[in-house]
Image (cartoon, coloured by chain):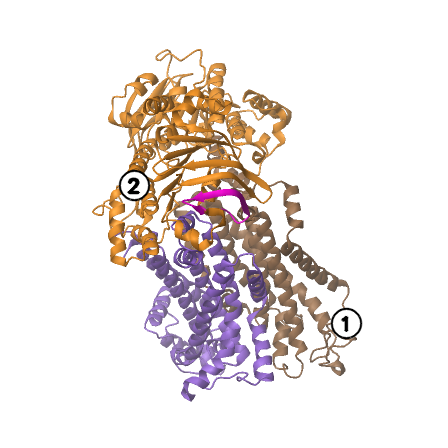
Chain colours: A orange, B purple, C brown
Amino acid sequence: MSLIEIENLSLTIGATPILTGVELTIAPGEVVGLVGESGSGKSMTALTIMRLLPHLARAEGRVAFDGIDILAATEDQMCALRGDDIGMVFQEPMTALNPVKTIGEQVAEGIRWHTKAGRAEAEERTRKILDRVGLPEAKFPLSRYPHELSGGQRQRVVIAIACALKPKLLIADEPTTALDVVLQAQILDLLRDLVSENRMGLLLISHDLAVVTEMADRLTILRSGEVTEAGDTARTLSEQQHPYTRELALASMHVPARPKPHLAGSAKPLLEVENVGRDYPGRRTSLFRPAEPIRAVHDVSLTIEPAQSVALVGRSGCGKSTLARMILALDKPTAGTIRFRGEPITGKPEQALKPTRRDMQVVFQDPYGSFDPRQKVEKLVAEPLHLLERQPAKAERREMVALALHEVGLGPRDMDKYPHEFSGGQRQRLSIARAIITRPKLVVADEPVSALDVSIRAQILDLFAELNQKLGIAYLFITHDLTVARAMADEVLVMHEGRIVERGRATDVLDHPRSEAARALVAAAPDLHRAIARKMQEQG
Amino acid sequence: MTAYLLKRLIIAVLTLVLASMVVFAVMEILPGDPARLMLGLNASADQVEMLRDQMGLNAPLVLRYLHWAGGLLSLDFGRSYTYSVPVIDLVRERIAVSLPLALIALALSTVIAIPVGVFSASRQGRAGDTLVMGAAQLGVAVPNFWFALMLIYLFAVWLRLVPAGGFPGWGAGIWPALKSLILPAVALALPQAAILARVARSALIEVLNEDYIRTARAKGLPHRAVLWRHALRNAMIPVLTILGLQFAFLLAGTIIIENVFYLPGLGRLIFQAITQRDLIVVESIVMLLVAAVILINLLVDFSYAIVDPRLRGRQ
Amino acid sequence: MTMRVDLPEETLEGVLAKALGNRSFLIGLVVTLLIVAVALVSFVWTPYDVTKLVIADKTQAPSWTHLFGTDHFGRDILSMIMVGARNSIAVALVAVGIGMGIGVPLGAFAAARGGLADEALMRVNDLIFAFPALLSAIMITAIFGPGAVNAIIAIGIFNIPVFARVTRAGALAIWPREFILAARAAGKGMTRITVEHILPNIATLLLVQGTIQFALGILAEAGLSYVGLGAQPPMPSWGRMLFDAQTRMVTAPWMAIFPGMAIVITVLGLNLLGDGLADILDPKSRRRR
């Protein structure tokens, strides 16, 4: 018998249809993956089961949990189910915990509410579950506040809250999307163990096909609120009967074609970073003792040659973004020198940096945050033209913008639009257009595709590859995602705790990592090929 | 003490010192010689000069400031020119009216505003919320002294429930004294309560949209429990900020309201002193009120640390 | 799915459409325009001359000849309210101007520079906040004697840290955003980024705060002239009219009721306008609906 049965579920918010005719079942002890791109209705399906939908949402169809009709249940009945029989883990660990309550209070609260246990008993159970999720009391007493924990630790607390009463069903909505790959692997392991220990049903929601393939017994693929395909993980992905399934799988493994890969040692270096370090003033613990500085980057050296594509990979907080900012002269190193085309750029006044900035541009991660919402595309894309010696006339400027837009696959008519009129992928194209308008020699791209859906991501990677071939632009990709490094880079640098611990040809580093940090990254990175192969063995 | 509290304390002391310099400077550039004012127009130049020496008015500026500031610390504000008594005696008498009035008003406005804000936020968009917030919108627009006049008209002139003004003194018994403070306190408190209720409501609504509220709901807590246990404490942070700012308005309001009700408080004293150009009294009261505002803001800073563990840090 | 806090992403047409559908904005706008119109009309026409004392007509109850009655000098209350509107609006408007003119550049500078400049500005803010407008007015009056200009200066000074704070907080929220980094990568300096990117993005914030401070200014001016620290007779002002009415509450309540209503309606109108603007322009409120 199924734990949860969703039949012909339709959902509207106001007049907008969100879900149409969704079917889904989960048996006790079963892991079901719900996959889809952003806006496909994955989260809304989960919130329907919890009955935590936004005010204006109207659900129709049948959702039965353990024989209870969820859509018809009273609020009191739902309160009895939530946290007791159904637990839920959310995407954003940084904001999912109440900042003014201790972790002990927050875990114990649900236990006391549902079991009517006394304080001492509830705390005892809280200790046990926190210990189980990897937060032993000796290091993480119940009196800790969320802000004293890291993102991964906070996500463990959220899991402890959800699993404290051994629910029959656990819903995990993108539980690892906000974490780096190493933490992701740890959290996924924890979820897998908890589920099998207690024979829970798990609904795992993710945009990442590789993650879901590794975890799930069965898959349901959602597109624009409709189920396109559902079935055993191995069979669904090996047969790929529905074209959308194939599209997703291909996009997840996409490697852009680069007919002329760069040969190392062929030219004078474009960028040289020598023994660069960056200290930040630390938090003072006492007014009378000076604070210990925090070493974000320590003694880093690297070179990039013209037209070479280099990936800088590492876990979150390893210092890679700080390094990128120093290279872009947006932050000053506290030690070492950075040279661009032989010219040192450290310690130069802004005016003297103009020629350097012209040849070195940047693409950021967030396609929403990287444009001033008050300006039109023409002005936004033309912004770096400010760096030219001779300011182009208005007509000439429009022409240059039109050309840059053309190069990234957009039309000249897009010039007079505002950024919010574009989709996420199109905005990342705008971002690239802005970066190439001055014909730079180097583009630094900080996680340029990690906020994009897989299909869009493949297109943007293709665009990067094409521009590298056509315009001979060198890249420095900053990423925690090894598939990007594999797809795009000639050379890979691995950064760990502020230092570069390994560098070499991309295939060498990714297939045969030597340093411990690199091995951890490679082992933790989800890989769709590998996952499907493993599933095929398991499921025959 | 944590670094945060120490920093706030140092800032408060610094602000107080700067404020005292401002007040001192203002009094320095004032026209008129205090010695001549005290002795009257018939005094000879020698007499004035002698008094100036006595009063320390001929000392260098820095010394005069230090002398004055030192006096403040030991509650020696100097002597009133017109009453010829130590200013502290005048102030002590009047503060027994003004301080209770301000505190009653502050308490009253908080006690009214918080439940109203919670009520409104938990019924967001429904009839009760619309009604209460409409009333609050009106309350914010009403000047407290005009509201006071209307209250007098209604309760003192028409219904004759309370005295229209005046103060019998605490010697006349607690109840008669309190009774004459009721209308002034209500007149002060209601417009402030309207502002506070609006802030409390919007802070709560903001907090109710946070992710951790959803986590609490996913635990199975019913709506009410989430509101009281999780949302309210987080919403207190902006409410405290406004409460601190309001105290300054409340003090200013007290000064004005005392004139409406003929209450013998600091407000009456300062206006009498202005008309009589008794500047040392003006200076002392301004300094006192400024110190009160700074003190309250320090208390607000400290209470942030009680509400928000992120400010406490680990020892 | 995470909720995003976006900066306003609006076209002019979208904003206009929302404005026409927002009740508090419309009511607030109509009331505010009405009051401003009344103040303007008073320059060319009032029912009676407010400078002429007609003792024979003193303290008359409202009637068809004197809609709002007359005061103890026989002056027409309606005419006085009309002329008083000028004073209230002028004082509050100039005070907002002072606050914005000084506070906005200070706040923007502090946010852009950070460090010591920022710390110093915040300390000066603390200092000014310690002097409520009434206390500044008292001190200014003690120096220069009473007058309408005192009220403007006192309220204006109090507005400076308000705008400095709002500007600083708004600017600090925008500085770390990626489009600012992009502008810096395009070689633009602090001033240029502030003018081109920061200020346009916090303009709505300042507009809303401006309406709020305008309303507060009207209340503060009424309070100051009520205690004699603002506009001086014979210049009619709403606060002063209430002071005159106080001792005549029993015999001539209309002298207190109508000027008070004028204040309430003006402030209410401005507050509704501010609320409406905030609703229309704040991307968060859009998300909530």
The residue where tag 2 is placed is A198
Residue B198: x and y in percent read 52, 60
Q: Is residue A22 left or right of residue A65?
A: right
Residue A192: x and y in percent read 31, 35
SS label for mark 2 = helix
Q: Amino acid at mark 2?
A: Asn
Q: Residue at x 59, y 80 (%)?
A: B154
For mark 1, name the chain.
C
Magenta-drawn segment = A50-68
Name of the residue lying farthest toward the right: C65
Residue A462 lies, with reference to residue C19, above or below; the image says above
Which corner quadrant of the image does residue A339 belong to?
A: top left
Q: Amino acid at mark 1?
A: Tyr
Q: Are marks 2 and 1 on the same chain?
A: no
Q: Which mark is residue C48?
A: 1
Residue A456 lies, with reference to residue B123, above or below; the image says above
Q: Residue at x 40, y 68 (%)?
A: B292
